[in-house]
Image: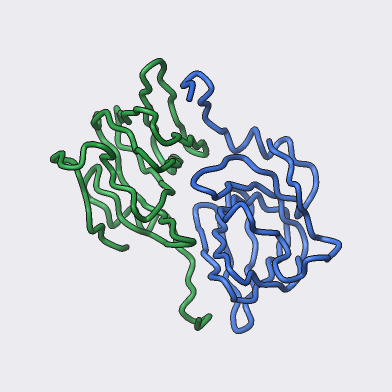
Chain colours: A blue, B green
Amino acid sequence: MENQALQKVVLADKFDQINDHWNPRIAGELNGQQVKLAKFMGPFEWHHHEHEDEFFMVVKGEFEMHLRDKVITLLPGEFLIVPRGVEHRPVAHQEAEVLMFEPASTVNTGNLEHSERTRKDLERL
Amino acid sequence: MENQALQKVVLADKFDQINDHWNPRIAGELNGQQVKLAKFMGPFEWHHHEHEDEFFMVVKGEFEMHLRDKVITLLPGEFLIVPRGVEHRPVAHQEAEVLMFEPASTVNTGNLEHSERTRKDLERL
């Protein structure tokens, strides 16, 4: 490992490069996990992940995580871990910048493998 | 999994409960990884982790990550992944609030297993 290759990631710069919604980019990898960045806008689809827990943290804006029995509103500086198997649906009434942390194998739409929202082969920022 | 048990984590509230330095607390767990929170102040020790990559993100304040050949200053909204095997030493000239993401097995002082700074059996916030 060349230390010279090590660089910090400035989240604001990365989000400036994102001009669409619900399309996660990879901003880092460690221990088989990925740091993903996405802009949320509008309602996403109900889905769950069979084998993976997901971490969501708001960097800018806010969004609601809808669960079957409640809604959790996430603001900047707040995070939520959605355990595997739990149905969830993010809804952003305004654009939100969100950092996610999850296994490299996680697909954004979970059990809905062929949704029009499904994104695989994610771009790296 | 009872959804009612799911709660968001407000980072500012958690950091309010931390009144010491270099003593990571567990704020969440997912996929065998832990989200840890710590306040940094002053210089830490040079160390590395044999098998684990570490993610550092500044929530408040700033600190320097010293590597053998350069120094990377991290500000709020910036993160750095230190790959396994890379010697590093965080130094905070003022108090910094830092979120870390790493395997549950990671010990803060890495190869220095018995440093006075070593913390095991971390408290959960």
Say left or right for A32 vs B62.
Answer: right
Image location of residue B114, percent across then percent down? 15, 42
Location of residue B64 with respect to B99 vertically, above or below: above
Q: Residue furthest front?
A: B51
**Residue at the outermost right position:** A116
Quadrant assignment for the C terminus of chain A = top right
Q: In the image shown, does B9 or A61 lie closer to the viewer?
A: B9
Q: Residue furthest top?
A: B69
For the residue pair B112 and B14, the one nearer the viewer reads as B112
Rendered view: B60 above or below A63: above
> Residue at position x 73%, y 57% from top?
A94
- Give the vertical position of A104 relative to A1 (above or below): below
Residue at 77 percent of width and 70 percent of height: A112
Q: What residue appears at the point 57 percent right and 65 percent down from the top-left corner?
A: A52
Residues B74 and B88: in front is B88
Q: Position of residue B123 (x, y in %)?
A: 26, 60
Where residue A123 sits, quadrant-wise, is top right
Residue A28: image location, x then y, percent: 58, 40
**Residue beneath the point at 49% across and 61% down:** B31
Q: How many marks?
A: 0
A17 relative position to B94: left or right: right
A28 relative to B13, above or below? above
